[in-house]
Image (cartoon, grey):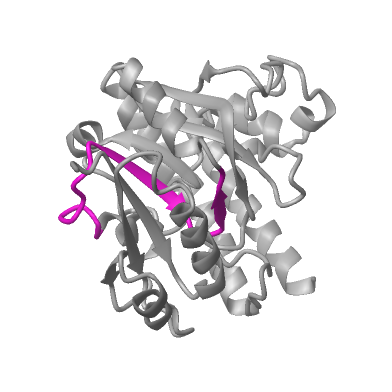
Amino acid sequence: MKTRLSIVILNYNTANLTKNCLNSIKKVRDEVPFEVIVCDNGSTDGSCELIRKEFPWVKLIENGANLGFAAGNNKAKPYVKGEYVLFLNSDTIIKKGTLKETVKYMDKNSRVGALSCRLVLADGRNLDKDARRCFPTPWVALTHFSNLDRIFPNSRLFARYWCGGAPEDRVQEVDVIQGAYFLTRRSVIDSVGWFDEDYFLDGEDIDLCWKIKEKGFKVIYFPKVSIIHLKGASKGKKSAAGIKVKLKDKIKYRMSSVDSMEIFYKKRLWQKYPLILNIMVIIGIKCLRAIRLIKLLIS
């Protein structure tokens, strides 16, 4: 049977998470003809040995070093065979019907270039707000980092970052979907060049959505089906599922997320705003980097 979907999972020292994720995929193998590719970023926790032993049907790519999210996932490019490509975090659990319904929606809507489902947090109830976002323009970023979007969570003026005011249970076009469940067409991702490897961690999903929308395709949040997302665990931002994160790694990952803000702004937004505003934005990002570093060091 022809492979319709290529599921790409990036693993870096998350053996238990990846095992649980793969087991959840195994349970829905009858929903759509798929292949699974795990790209390992030089894990030292026995991940590769576990995958080879317990999941021989998984195609394992050993990168040999921590290349980051973008470059690590891009290593799957020569191997994918599916019409669709799903980038899936290792800290996720696939639910019944999710693969089937999201692929079905893409089949029926040819102008959809990328899609994500409802991402449910570990409590099993609440939405991961990053499942749907707006591009971080200066105004959107200001209202987000000033907490105005928390004060006015349903305001279309102050809460645009997380699509405030738009119902969580409605299928809708958005600017950005999260890389935890990022379903796209092989033809589309090939046309935009896959992930931009200037990003090490965070920001690459925002950038990819930008490139897909530039090509005239829609980015869709599809909450009719869902997955569980143990948010932050696969990126080493917090301890989860038995993972203990060293301080130096926390600093590396947290600073990478701030660096991605500056990379995205300079690549995609710099030419759209006056120089004085651009300078103010960059100063703001550097101040945010300093604040986050201080908080990590004293926590």
Q: Is residue 119 visible?
A: yes
144 or 234: nearer the viewer = 234
Residue 161: which quarter of the image?
A: top right
163 or 142: nearer the viewer = 163
Within the magenta stretch, is there residue 90?
A: yes
Quarter occupied by the C terminus: bottom right
Q: Is residue 270 visible?
A: no
Residue 115: which quarter of the image?
A: top left
The structure residue drawn at horizontal position 43% and vertical position 67%, both measured from the top left corner, is: 11
Determine whether 298 is above or below 9 in the image. Answer: below
Could you say where residue 241 lies in the image, as x and y percent from the top left? 66, 69
Could you say where residue 296 lies in the image, as x and y percent from the top left? 71, 68
Question: In the figure, is residue 101 to the left or right of 7?
Answer: right
Question: In the figure, is residue 274 to the left or right of 94?
Answer: left
Determine whether 280 is above or below 18 in the image. Answer: above
Question: In the figure, is residue 88 to the left or right of 20?
Answer: left
Q: How many marks?
A: 0
Within the magenta stretch, is there residue 167?
A: no
The structure residue drawn at horizontal position 54% and vertical position 32%, both measured from the top left corner, is: 136
Could you say where residue 74 lies in the image, as x and y percent from the top left? 27, 55
Residue at the far left in the pictured view = 78
Quarter occupied by the N terminus: top left
The structure residue drawn at horizontal position 67% and vertical position 66%, both measured from the top left corner, is: 238
120 or 151: nearer the viewer = 120
Could you say where residue 280 lies in the image, as x and y percent from the top left? 57, 37
Residue at the far right in the pictured view = 151
The structure residue drawn at horizontal position 56% and vertical position 44%, both measured from the top left corner, is: 95
Q: Which residues are magenta?
A: 75-95
